[in-house]
Amino acid sequence: MTYFIDRRANAKNKSAVNRQRFLDRYRTHIKRSVEEAVNRRSITDMERGEKVSIPARDISEPVFQHGTGGKRSIVAPGNREFVEGDRLRRPGGGGGGGSGEGSASNQGEGMDEFAFTLSREEFLDFVFDGLELPHLERKNLVDLDEVKPVRAGISREGVPARINIVRSMRQAQARRIAMRAPLQRALREAREALEAEERKDPVLRNPSRVSELKAEIERLERRLEAVPFLDTYDLRYNHLVDQPQPSSKAVMFCVMDVSGSMTQAHKDIAKRFFLLLYLFLERNYEKVELVFVRHHTAAKEVEEEEFFYSRETGGTIVSSALNLVDEIIEARYPPGQWNLYVAQASDGDNWDDDSVTCREVLMKSLMPRLQYFTYVEITPHAHQALWEEYERVEVEYADRFAMRQIVEPGDIYPVFRELFRSRAVR
């Protein structure tokens, strides 16, 4: 048997590399367990890890082993009981189905499931895998704090980390040439004069002149040697400037119906949907603002705590929420600078002709400025007038308007994934 052992160092004695390979290999099983966990969890219990079980039959690993090699001649004892392909019962009696549950039986076989725990980060990675905000665009320059350092030539001042070695060496070579050239010319002339003086007849030779030339040559040679190879004057640095970048800032309007027709079960479903949305945005996007709007007969912008836990209720006029969203956009979020999104949850019950008003507000004011509008209707019954009016909006803005129905808590996560699937998955 040959074993391949990964001895690469990992922090805290954990095999992080092998764990990631394991998660990638059994992604399908893990995603199925994660979906089941999301559906059964409470509103306030979405961010912890999860224990995942994988059937033991699905985690068999390939192995390498040495064969006997060559040709062999063997004598195998025969039998009258088994033939090739027979399955042998496990020794020790019958077993369960492998999940550890159920009553005893005198037949069956299996193995225990393999169980392990996902961390909070790994759990949320699987929950939001393959999701994105649709039609997110790069908008105009709005914030000076969103900048990118770009090259802007060469500077004589800078930090050692930005030194440009090539330009520095080129500058040093140019300086050496400039400083040594007159010295080398003078040295060459002095040597030629000394050589000419020494070739003269001893009677005509001037000893003092020879001494002067030798001293001059030594002085010039010392000056040449004193020219530094690299001087601080030669250093050149890459000059970087902060260039403003187009902003991809976005704002998500969370609009929830809290009217009397919304039962507590309906509100819990809506809260779980918006909690998923909140976690998705907070985890995957750095610059996304959330605006929470609750409405019954009147709409009100509220804080996160009040949005999820307030018990205020009343009648139903959905257009009040859409008009409030329109006013907030007009006052604080210019469409040329922001990506605008709206997520609305309601049971579809609305006051008389207000559904027509909702359609008109969407068609004339909101949809031309929004990147994406999603509507979830929480009801087990037939759709009402609001759904029918929204269908007319969906026909006009098919790529930027989506609506789904949620009947029970188990529908929340599948609907959420449908509404925010990434373009690659679509």
Image (cartoon, grey):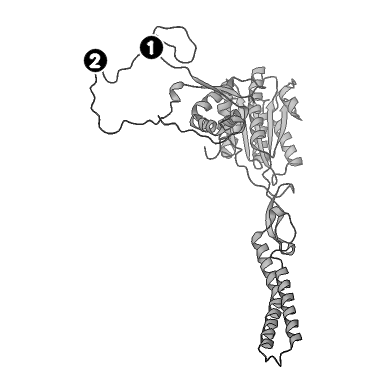
Horizontal and vertical percent position of residue 393: 60, 36
Badge 1: few (under 14), some or many (20 or more) residues near its Cα, within 10 Å? few
Q: Quadrant of residue 15?
A: top right
User: Residue 375 placed where, x, y %?
Assistant: 62, 31
Q: Which residue is mark 1?
A: 91
Task: Indicate left or right for 228 with 12 as reference.
Answer: right
Q: Nearer the viewer, residue 238 or 322?
A: 238
Q: Nearer the viewer, residue 137 or 152?
A: 152
Mark 2, residues whose alpha carbon is within 10 Å: few (<14), some, or many (≥20)? few
211 to the left or right of 105? right
Q: Residue at x 27, y 15 (%)?
A: 82
Note whether 216 is above or below 345 in the view shown: below
Q: Which of these two is toward me, 131 or 99?
A: 99
Asked which secondary structure carries label 2, the reply is loop
Mark 1 residue element:
loop
Q: Quadrant of residue 178?
A: bottom right
> Which amino acid type corresponds to the residue marked 2 in the rendered image?
Asn
Q: Quadrant of the N terminus?
A: top left
2 or 1: tag closer to the N-terminus: 2
> Where is residue 58 shown, x and y percent of the image?
44, 25
